[in-house]
């Protein structure tokens, strides 16, 4: 089939590229697990999950992990066939069409930005709490948050392998202190001996489990960002699936184990009273009792570094989404510039930092609380947006594989993604129904926060129509495959009507399919 040259993508970098082959499985795993902030989730959120769900709370984390593991089956299978740097939105565009893909791209931007920018409020409050606990200092939150913006910008400005090494160190610190707590509890045998009662049906099948599941799904946010690093991964067809499964398995098992350990530290009856009396101090009390006050001091410090690690991981993910969309021509071309020395999307990073500064300062000027409002109000639509993104991706997988010839089995291309779509839809309903637990806000505020997600998606559909009408060349090559990694013709999706038999790519004289370019993309300009 003859190839027709395609104009270079607008927004490509000026003679440089991301650092190809810089990340291995462990590096990508560090990024995605760090984004979830295990120590912050455990010490800050798990006590509330115990209070709501009782001693069966650990099972909620296992169930959430199992759901996301099923999602990862189709997700990682798709990663072998769609190599665009747009990750989620590229998968959705191939399965559900370009309009939905552009809507998903805006969802990704609000999702990752919401998850990151709100956490600057958490950075301010955790640093202030650490200062009071260790030195009796009263540290104002705003200077800490602004300093955090600069620190995270610098981490994203440097090379991706620098970030991976830094996150590796911080992740070992935050998980290590939790392992130390667990080891102390296990060696002492807990308060009244170790018990598996947390996993008994009577403890799990209680009304509060729905709330626990909502918290548990939120605790995994960020694991799906493995595919964002495809261009920088070594052997991405193997590295990305491995990192995804490692992240999901580690988080699910680790969360459940640590929550179970803390229940053992107090006892099944006593832990509910302790969580009700002082949820913020539950983990610190446990580690002081079973390890020592020095370990509690370390936990205070490592919570701050856990938040920093999460911020850096999300910042890097956002920058790469912005880079991909700039290269597509959807975002301004300047955001597609890559640093000639560090191989980082430094202009996208600067823009994201500026956006974060504007939002942080706006909340501060309004006199908002950094935790209850900046963190919770900004995080909540981000979390729901990313869950909606996963749901769309799960739906896109079987639709995509129905249209193309492939060698994948039905478990990967149909059963697992359909099952994941159903489970994710249930999870989103749980989160929305329990949104007041996340925000601690009024019904009006909660309605606005939830409504922001579909509103952004609809704005994406409107943007897609505008691009198709006014910039058809940008619309036509949206989510196109990079020429350097172009798959065989039988693995390329065509947007034929649903139910059509698989067919080869059209020739240049054929009518253009609704959502795929009629010719393979030309190689990008030399970098």
Image (tube, rainbow, N blue to C red):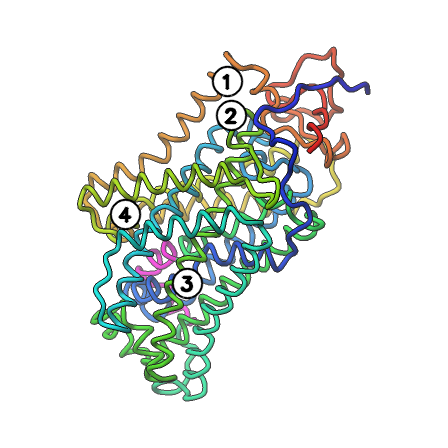
Which quarter of the rendering shows the C terminus? Answer: top right
CB contact under 8 Å: marks 4 and 2: no
Q: Is residue 345 above or below residue 261?
A: above
Which quarter of the rendering shows the N terminus? Answer: top right
Q: Residue at x 35, y 67 (%)?
A: 43
Per the image, the residue denoted by label 1 is 467
Of the numbered discs in the image, which one, if any, rests on residue 330? 2
Q: Residue at x 54, y 24 (%)?
A: 329
Distance from the alpha carbon under mark 4 to that under mark 3: 19 Å
Quick one: SS at disc 2? loop
Distance from the alpha carbon under mark 4 to that under mark 1: 33 Å
Per the image, the residue denoted by label 3 is 305
- Mark positioned earlier in the residue sequence (4 or 2): 2
Q: Nearer the viewer, residue 169 or 487?
A: 169
Q: Residues within 10 Å of mark 1 (few under 14, many from 20)?
A: some
Dot in front, 4 or 1: 4
Distance from the alpha carbon under mark 3 to that under mark 2: 35 Å
Per the image, the residue denoted by label 4 is 374
- Mark positioned earlier in the residue sequence (1 or 3): 3
Is residue 492 visible in the rendered image? The answer is yes
The magenta stretch is 199-215
Dot in front, 4 or 3: 3
């Amino acid at each position: 089939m003859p190839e027709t040259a395609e104009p270079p993508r607008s927004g490509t970098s000026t003679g440089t590229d991301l650092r190809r082959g810089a990340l291995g499985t462990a590096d990508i795993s560090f990024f995605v697990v760090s984004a979830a902030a295990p120590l912050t989730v455990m010490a800050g959120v798990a006590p509330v999950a115990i209070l709501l769900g009782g001693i069966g709370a650990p099972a909620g984390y296992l169930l959430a992990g199992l759901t996301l593991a099923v999602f990862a089956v189709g997700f990682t299978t798709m990663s072998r066939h769609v190599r665009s740097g747009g990750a989620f939105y590229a998968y959705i565009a191939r399965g559900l069409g370009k309009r939905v893909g552009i809507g998903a791209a805006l969802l990704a931007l609000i999702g990752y930005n919401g998850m990151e920018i709100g956490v600057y409020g958490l950075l301010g409050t955790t640093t202030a709490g650490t200062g009071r606990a260790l030195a009796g200092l009263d540290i104002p939150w705003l200077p800490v948050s602004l300093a955090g913006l600069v620190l995270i910008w610098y981490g994203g400005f440097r090379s991706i392998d620098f970030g991976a090494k830094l996150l590796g160190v911080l992740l070992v610190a935050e998980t290590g202190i939790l392992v130390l707590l667990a080891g102390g509890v296990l060696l002492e045998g807990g308060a009244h001996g170790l018990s598996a009662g947390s996993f008994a049906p009577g403890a799990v099948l209680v009304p509060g489990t729905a709330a626990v599941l909502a918290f548990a799904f939120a605790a995994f946010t960020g694991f799906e960002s493995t595919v964002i690093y495809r261009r920088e991964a070594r052997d991405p067809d193997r590295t990305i699936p491995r990192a995804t499964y490692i992240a999901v398995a580690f988080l699910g098992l680790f969360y459940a184990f640590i929550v179970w350990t803390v229940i053992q530290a107090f006892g099944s009856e006593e832990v509910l009273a302790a969580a009700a009396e002082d949820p913020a101090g539950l983990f610190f009390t446990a580690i002081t009792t079973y390890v020592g006050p020095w370990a509690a001091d370390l936990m205070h410090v490592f919570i701050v570094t856990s938040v920093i690690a999460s911020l850096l991981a999300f910042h890097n993910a956002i920058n790469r989404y912005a880079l991909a969309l700039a290269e597509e021509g959807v975002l301004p071309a300047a955001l597609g510039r890559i640093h000639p020395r560090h191989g980082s999307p430094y202009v996208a990073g600067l823009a994201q930092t500026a956006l974060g500064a504007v939002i942080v300062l706006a909340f501060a000027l309004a006199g908002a609380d950094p935790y209850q409002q900046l963190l919770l109000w900004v995080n909540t639509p981000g979390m729901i947006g990313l869950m909606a993104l996963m749901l769309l991706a799960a739906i896109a997988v079987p639709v995509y594989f129905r249209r193309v010839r492939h060698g994948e089995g039905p478990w990967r291309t149909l059963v697992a993604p359909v099952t994941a779509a159903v489970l994710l839809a249930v999870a989103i309903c749980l989160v929305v129904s329990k949104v007041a637990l996340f925000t601690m806000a009024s019904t009006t505020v909660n309605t606005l926060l939830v409504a922001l997600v579909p509103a952004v998606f609809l704005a994406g559909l409107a943007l897609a129509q505008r691009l198709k009408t006014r910039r058809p060349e940008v619309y036509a090559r949206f989510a196109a495959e990079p020429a350097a990694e172009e798959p065989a013709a039988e693995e390329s999706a065509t947007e034929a009507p649903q139910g059509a038999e698989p067919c080869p790519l059209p020739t240049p004289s054929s009518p253009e399919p609704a959502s795929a370019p009629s010719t393979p993309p030309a190689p990008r300009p030399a970098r």
